[in-house]
Amino acid sequence: MLKLLVCVSGGGTNLQAIIDSIADGRITNAKIVGVISNNPGVKSLERAANAGIPACVISPKDYADRDAFNRAFLEKVKDTDPDLVVLAGFLVRIPEEFVKEYSNRIVNIHPSLIPSFCGVGYYGLKVHERALERGVKITGATVHFVNEGMDEGPIIAQKAVEVLDGDTPEVLQRRVMEQAEWVILPKAIDDIANGRISVTDGKVVRI
Ligand code: GRF
């Protein structure tokens, strides 16, 4: 049974997709052992509580400096002892030490088709704003392992979503979530939990 720790910042719809997928069998062989939010009072924490999942808030704002936050975050991760950490809309730069220690055991969901619209400054609604500014006709989402680079780790899954005339960033964000994120994130977790993928030469391969 793969133990999942899910890190969130806001609404938690991806967290909910994982919870629902475990409940209805789209994800097997995995359970959520903890949720970390960097923001207090967010809907994600309510979703965790409703599902009976232990959750806590660790915010950089509550620590004297970044190092102190990093230490507290890492300590919490170790206490939870996860097999896989899922960054599901987690808007905090994660400690480098953590990335090294949990190599190929951290996944992130990004709301574009990497390598488009990713890297520094591309998060949340900004990703969709830039996609609309550029006038792309297809966008989507990517699940990838996290490495030291920003949105540069091995890609596990991607799904394309059409951009439609008249889309606003909010409308496009919602379509990308519904058609891509909530589908490929649970599927990727199920693949990992059931030993269907591995990383070879920096790329994800199916086994
Ligand atoms: C999602 O669009 C995710 O791809 C991005 O942040 C958003 C989080 O949404 N990284 P939610 O908190 O899961 O609803």
Image: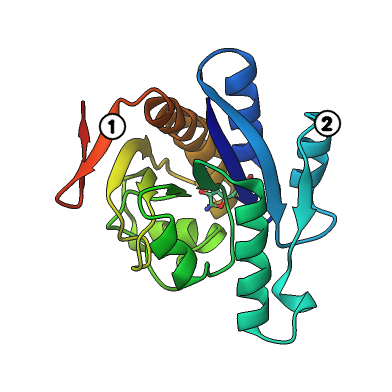
Q: Furthest-top residue in view?
A: 24
Q: Amino acid at mark 1?
A: Ile
Determine whether the residue tagged by mark 1 lies in a helix, strand or loop. Answer: strand
> Which dot, 2 or 1, sits closer to the camera?
1
Percent of width and height locating residue 153 = 31, 56
Residue that mark 2 sits on = 50
Q: Up-down: is 27 above or below 160?
A: above
Residue 98 vs residue 107, the one in the foreground:
98
Check the picture and name the quadrant holding the C terminus: top left
Residue 190 visible in this rendered orientation of the protein: yes
Percent of width and height locating residue 119 = 38, 68
Percent of width and height locating residue 147 = 35, 61
Q: Up-down: is 172 above or below 151?
A: above
Residue 10 visible in this rendered orientation of the protein: no
Q: Furthest-bottom residue in view?
A: 64
Residue 24 vs residue 32, the one in the foreground:
32
Colour mode of the rendering = rainbow
Q: Amino acid at mark 2?
A: Asn
Residue at 59% x, 21% y: name it. 22
